[in-house]
Structures are given as C-alpha cells and as structure tokens.
Image: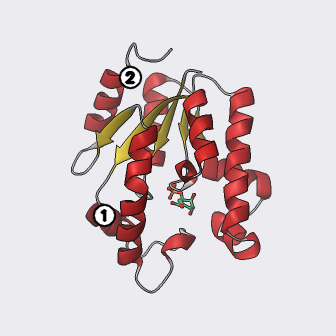
Amino acid sequence: MNNIILIGFMGCGKTSVGIKLSYLLKQIMTDTDRMIERQSQMTISEIFDKYGEETFREMETECLKKLLQESDNRIISVGGGLPMQSENRVLLKRLGKVIYLRVTAATVCERLSGDMSRPLLQGPNPEQKVRELLEKRSPIYESVADIIIDVDGKGFDEILGEIVERTEGKTE
Ligand code: S3P
C-alpha cells in the first residue's frame, strides 16, 4: 500500500508533522491514538486506567487491521509504543512506507515536561522512564523503518522537506 506511516517516541512530533504533511501532500491524515479514542469514547489515559495497557495494545493492533482494509494514500501517525509488538511491525510494513522520526531523550523531556496525557510517563521519575524506554525501543524503531529522520533542532519545513525528498518515487 501507498500510505506514509510516521513512527517514533512520544514527543517526537509524529502528529504535528503528520498534519503538516497531510496539507502539503493533500492526503488524509489518520492518527491511531485518535482513532482509538473516537471508537472507545475514552481518552488514552482512561483506557489505561480502566482496562490496562494490554487492552490498549490490542486496540492498536485492531486499528492497523482496520487501516489495512480501508486506507491508502494516507498519512498515518501511530502511538509511540505501537511498533513494539512484532505483529504490528508486519502490519506497518504492509501499510506502506515507514518513517521513523528519531529524537533524543533530552528533547523528549523538554517537550513533554508537565505533560499529563501520557500514562507511561506519570510515575515519579519521568525523565528516567523516557531514557529507559527510548533505549529499549530505539533498535526496534530502526529495524522497522524504511527512512530515518533525525528531528532534533530541526523546524517543520526542514523535516517535511526531508520526508518529501526521501519518499519521492520510493512509494510502490
Ligand atoms: C505511548 C504513546 C502515546 C500513546 C500511549 C502510549 C507509548 O502516543 O499511544 O500513551 O507507549 O509510547 P504518542 O507517541 O503519540 O504520544
């Protein structure tokens, strides 16, 4: 399929980049977190609270399956933990070109300081959690990515320019 899928750690800019890219390329943008919230009529935090992370992960997989039935030529932004399940990585590859927006822990901590919407970062030491999770997840993000874009210190225009340049002619 011809979708462009944005993956990466919380706070890397998947949603903002996705929205701008969808305007630029005139393609519909879909965000798996928003899909899940719309379908369940709950926020991500409420889902974690009420049903736990495992149920949320199952919802993410269902989302990808649904997208495989419906979508093409879209920009799809996925939750930061979604690529951790191997089944999801297979589905991502089938959906289209996977772009990893790579960010450092320092930038994530700066951007998400005080954020209350990410249940995984609500513990006593969110900065350490960011570092641990990022270290564990980085090789997995890299393994599934067709294209890796380092986003630290770059503005939207530069990031969008790189995405367009590097995806042009490469989608099937
Ligand atoms: C998560 C990332 C969040 C959201 C949930 C879990 C994760 O999405 O799916 O809070 O495990 O990294 P964003 O990456 O859009 O913040």
In the picture, the quarter occupied by the N terminus is top right
The quarter of the picture where residue 52 lies is bottom right
119 left or right of 103 in image: right
- Find residue 105 and name its label: 1
Q: Residues within 10 Å of mark 1 (few under 14, many from 20)?
A: many
Task: Give the answer, above or below, for where 108 lies relative to 92.
Answer: below
Q: Position of residue 121 (x, y in %)?
A: 48, 73
21 left or right of 166 in image: right
Q: Residue at x 30, y 22 (%)?
A: 165
The reply to whether residue 13 is visible in this rendering is: no
Q: Residue at x 55, y 31 (%)?
A: 93
Ligand 1 positioned in quadrant: bottom right
Circle 1: residue type? Ala
Q: Position of residue 151 (x, y in %)?
A: 28, 46
The reply to whether residue 85 is visible in this rendering is: yes
Circle 2: residue type? Thr
Residue indicated by mark 2? 167
The quarter of the picture where residue 126 lies is bottom left
The yes-or-no answer for disc 2 within 8 Å of ligand 1 is no
Q: Residue at x 72, y 37 (%)?
A: 65
90 left or right of 150 in image: right
The quarter of the picture where residue 119 lies is bottom right
Element type where label 1 sits in the image? helix
Task: Give the answer, above or below, for where 152 lies relative to 54.
Answer: above
- Find residue 118 and name its label: none
- Name the N-terminal-most of marks 1 and 2: 1
> Which residue is at the front of the view, 125 or 136?
136
Q: Position of residue 140 (x, y in %)?
A: 44, 49
> Which residue is at the front of the view, 28 or 142?
142
Q: Position of residue 79 (x, y in %)?
A: 55, 52
